[in-house]
Amino acid sequence: MFCPKCGSLLLPKKIDGKRVMACSSCSYTSKDFEKTKIVEKTIKEREVDVVEGDDSKHLPITEVECPKCGNKKAYYWLVQTRAGDEPETKFLKCTKCKHIWRDYN
């Protein structure tokens, strides 16, 4: 529920022994707490599949020079390692020596 005066979120609170919905920004309190339904949801944990071994053969390949062995081909994948408004990080894995490095460009 939101405050009709300022639009802030109303939170359950005890005032004078009664439970009411109160605004944290202004002095508004709702007197109809009994009509308010609070729902709590618990998210169940999911099992994670662990992939063992070299699963690189399913990744796309690009032409880039490996800084370790000089090979000209590498697998690559993208991961969002920072905030959502920043670009993702490109990880590269050499097809020859399996060296992994990052590309921030």
Image: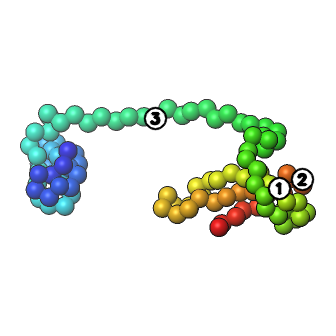
Q: Secondary structure at mark 3?
A: loop
Marks 3 and 2, the one that precedes in the sequence: 3
What's the residue at 84%, 66% (across, down)? Answer: 67
Marks 1 and 2, the one that precedes in the sequence: 1
As shown in the figure, which amino acid type bears the numbered disc 3? Ile
Quadrant the C terminus occupies: bottom right
- From the image, state whether disc 1 or disc 2 is nearer to you: 1
Q: CA distance from mark 3 to mark 2?
A: 43 Å
- From the image, state whether disc 1 or disc 3 is nearer to you: 1
Marks 1 and 3, the one that precedes in the sequence: 3
Q: CA distance from mark 1 to mark 2?
A: 8 Å
- According to the picture, the residue beneath numbered tag 1 turns out to be 73
Crowd tier of the residue under label 2, counting other residues whose Cα lies within 10 Å: few below 14, some 14–19, many 20 or above = few
Crowd tier of the residue under label 3, counting other residues whose Cα lies within 10 Å: few below 14, some 14–19, many 20 or above = few
- According to the picture, the residue beneath numbered tag 2 turns out to be 96
Q: Give percent across and percent down for residue 33.
A: 14, 39
Q: Give percent across and percent down for residue 84.
A: 49, 58
